[in-house]
Image (cartoon, helix red, strand yellow):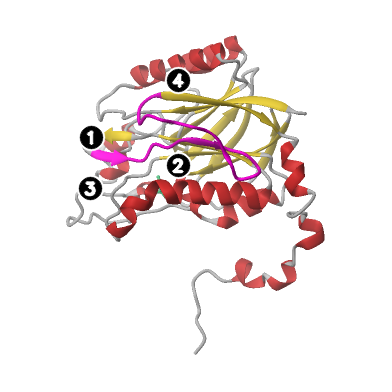
Amino acid sequence: MRLITVGAAQLGPIARYETRDKVVERLISLLHQASDRGCDLVVFPELALTTFFPRWYFPDDSPELLAYFETEMPSAETQPLFDEAKRLGIGFHLGYAELTPDGHRFNTAILVERDGTLVAKYRKVHIPGHEEHEPQRPFQHLERRYFEESSEGFSVWRAFGGVMGIALCNDRRWPETYRVMGLQGVEMIFIGYNTPLFYAPDPTQDPLQAFHNHLVMQAGAYQNGTWVVGVAKGGTEEGVESLAHSAVIAPSGQIVAQAVTDGDELITAQCDLDWCSHYKNTLFNFDRYRRPETYQLIGQQKGVIPPL
Ligand code: CDT
């Protein structure tokens, strides 16, 4: 057995003017709970340091917009989280908005080992929402305005005694996300999310948000024989209701731990990374059963081209 105890640290709402220091205090409080419960690793959600600012339109040079981005990691405000995690011997995953020195903006997540070493940085590939202000919406989803689509793709990293991968929010809805990591032998994928319950382009989907959330993560776990740790920023934030339902999902596709509130809540699970091989060596033995020569369209074509 290769056991790792993981904590999914769901966050409740972060107010528009809540300071980084206050948020980091909340993260450290969850870290302490994780330490008490024997966690090796704590997974914080997407954009965990601020309110989900893409719900508002800001001009490109708005000081408020720029203030939501991190220009360094760790920063002065996040250093206490890094220090406390290292002191406790706990690793962590953290999502944040990244502004690079040459002016590029990404929706980013990092993975830090128990000794404080930065293991991985991932920049979101599938950016949802829209680019321009849409006044008919009760709130915006301007991720496509504020973040570039990363072309770095999906990597995996050796850490915590296994092979770890990262995806962010909308990435979880796309089977390619899991399969590209599955082909690199991933054993645990961390997925932070901010998912408003109201979906303006098609509100018939609203009552299905929790179902779809678990559907995609459970399918991705099972079809690739990997653990998936899905962690929300949930609750009603600045008037917008967001999905909670954080969950730890086994390589069987079963949910082994699930949040019951929509606030700050730590759920934990003891995960055997060797469980992955049951699926990777049988039904989903890629080397034996996959037929990549028949999947060429997936790598070549973006949109749908129906027959004439
Ligand atoms: N943060 C993020 O990626 N949220 C999306 C919302 C989709 S609707 C614009 C999600 O897939 O949950």
Q: Which mark identifies residue 155?
A: none
* The magenta segment: 240-264
In the image shown, does 83 or 267 lie closer to the viewer?
A: 267
Disc 1 marks a residue whose amino acid type is Glu
Determine whether label 2 and label 3 are within 8 Å by CB.
no
Residue 240 vs residue 149: left or right?
A: left
Q: Is residue 147 visible?
A: no
Query: Badge 1, how many Cα within 10 Å: few under 14, some, many 20+?
Result: some
Q: Nearer the viewer, mark 2 or mark 1?
A: 1
Query: For numbered disc 1, what is the local secondary structure?
Result: loop
Label 4 CB less than 8 angstroms from ligand 1: no
Label 2 CB less than 8 angstroms from ligand 1: yes
Disc 3 marks a residue whose amino acid type is Phe
Image coords of residue 68 (percent x, y): 34, 33
In the image shown, does 250 or 147 lie closer to the viewer?
A: 250
Q: Earlier in the sequence, mark 4 or mark 1?
A: 4
Label 1 CB less than 8 angstroms from ligand 1: no
Q: CA distance from mark 4 to mark 2?
A: 17 Å
Q: Which residue is mark 3?
A: 139
Q: Earlier in the sequence, mark 3 or mark 1?
A: 3
Q: Earlier in the sequence, mark 4 or mark 2?
A: 4
Determine whether label 3 and label 4 are within 8 Å by CB.
no
